[in-house]
Image (cartoon, rainbow, N blue to C red):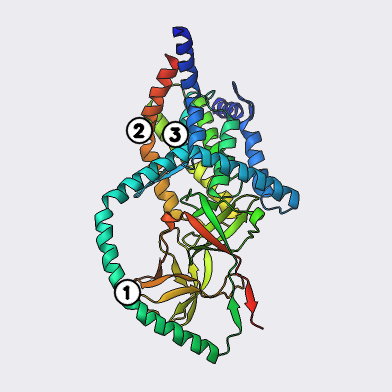
Amino acid sequence: MALLIKQSTIKFFELLPLIILFFITLNGNSVLDLNFFSLNLHYILIYYWVLRLPSSIGYGSIFLAGIITDVIIGVPIGTNAISLLAVASVATYVRVVTVRISLLNDWISFIPALLLGNFVYYAALYFSDYSINYIYLFTNSVFTFIFYPILWLIFTLILKLMKY
Amino acid sequence: METSRDDVGIAIRSAFLRKGTKQRFSIIALVLLSILLIFVEKIETKPLNSFRSIIKDLVYRSSLVVSSPGRWIKMATDATKNHFNLYKNYNELKKENLKLKGMISNEEFLVLENMQLRKLIDEQIESENNLISSRVMLDKKSPYNNSFIVNSGGNKGIKNGMAVLDGKKFIGRIVDVNFFSSRVLLVSDLNSKIPVIVEPSGNHAILSGRGKKNPTLDYLPKNHEIKDGSKVFTSGKEGIFTPGIPIGEAKITKDNVQVLLFSDLSQVTFVNISSGDLKKIK
């Protein structure tokens, strides 16, 4: 019985990143818009888990989450999917070329992921004749970058719980 | 140098082209599929539109289920707030009631006068709003898109471009119709442009959303006579909306003319969708 509970707990923590991804996607909270700032939860979540434990969130799930987000927020289908895959691709590349794991390394390498993700997102919207609020984009990117370490710590805790 | 370039090549190939451990798809394949989907989105054919409608309806329903705990928490919070504000609201309503009582007699006179003047100018058309009531299903205003989903679609005769009202006040238009749901683009959205008329000056303008709470009036003539409190209505110039639907009142700022909406877009639960048919008087 104790073994079953332990196995179920481990399974739950293994699935937790995927549950969080689809929960925030279906809940329409991929971009958390608060009174004074906003941050892109999707980018942080995907970047962290693809970098640290790629088996926890598959590329197919990222693609599907992007498609669902597109439908919910009402942008052309494929826009969020491609931007999330851009973030995942930077994370995959960084994972391949780095050896040491540290918050600072992850944080700095998050900058190109953020830039590429936003560039792809707005390029897709631009070609679909959507108006773009550049100031919003800039502040959103800045706060997503600032909040990365906080979520990094939370996700690292989940990662530790998965392993033990 | 050669070795370092080779390393980068290997890393890129390994990251993007290979599927990786426990991955069913490679990134590059999914990126290409996303690009294809973006292009397919622009193609308008009946089978594709039906497929898109089914997918969207399915996602909206799933989202409705997943977001229900959040909605319940919000409802409970609002109910608690309302409970604590009861006494304050009662006093405010009492004052407002007194003020409105005073205005009723004046309004009756104005209605009578308006009827006489309409007869005098031999009014040609009369608006007949075919209103369809709907409930707001999902209110997920993204920072890039101020819109929400209502639970009426093609099944109730909703079509693209129809005006959406909160009570009798204009708040947006239909931009995407599925079988059982539709998307309403609010006037505050960056992509929203509505032809309006400002009274009493009679100036025509375009009401442009800014992605913020208050939209602005664009393309106004240089010597316009708009003042704070001037009322903004739909002009019906584009031939879709019924003319004269109230939207808000003007507020002159340093840089532009903003419109304070009559309706609080964050508090809308039910909407009326108007087909805006114009019926000629025989």
Q: Residue B56 falls in which quadrant of the image?
A: top right
- The answer to whether marks 2 and 1 sit on the same chain is no
Tell whether B228 sits left or right of B194: left
Question: In this rendering, is residue A137 above or below A144?
Answer: below
Q: Which mark is residue A150?
A: 2
Q: Residue B108's spot in the image, x, y percent? A: 41, 81
Q: Residue B158's spot in the image, x, y percent? A: 63, 59
Q: Secondary structure at mark 2?
A: helix
| Mark whose residue sits in front, 2 or 1 | 1
Quote the CA–CA distance across marks 1 and 3: 66 Å
State whether residue A148 appears in this view: yes
| Mark whose residue sits in front, 2 or 3 | 2
- The residue under label 1 is B101
Question: In this rendering, is residue B106 above or below A40?
Answer: below
Chain under label 3? Answer: A
Residue type (three-letter) at the residue carrying disc 1: Lys
State whether residue A112 appears in this view: no
Chain under label 2? Answer: A
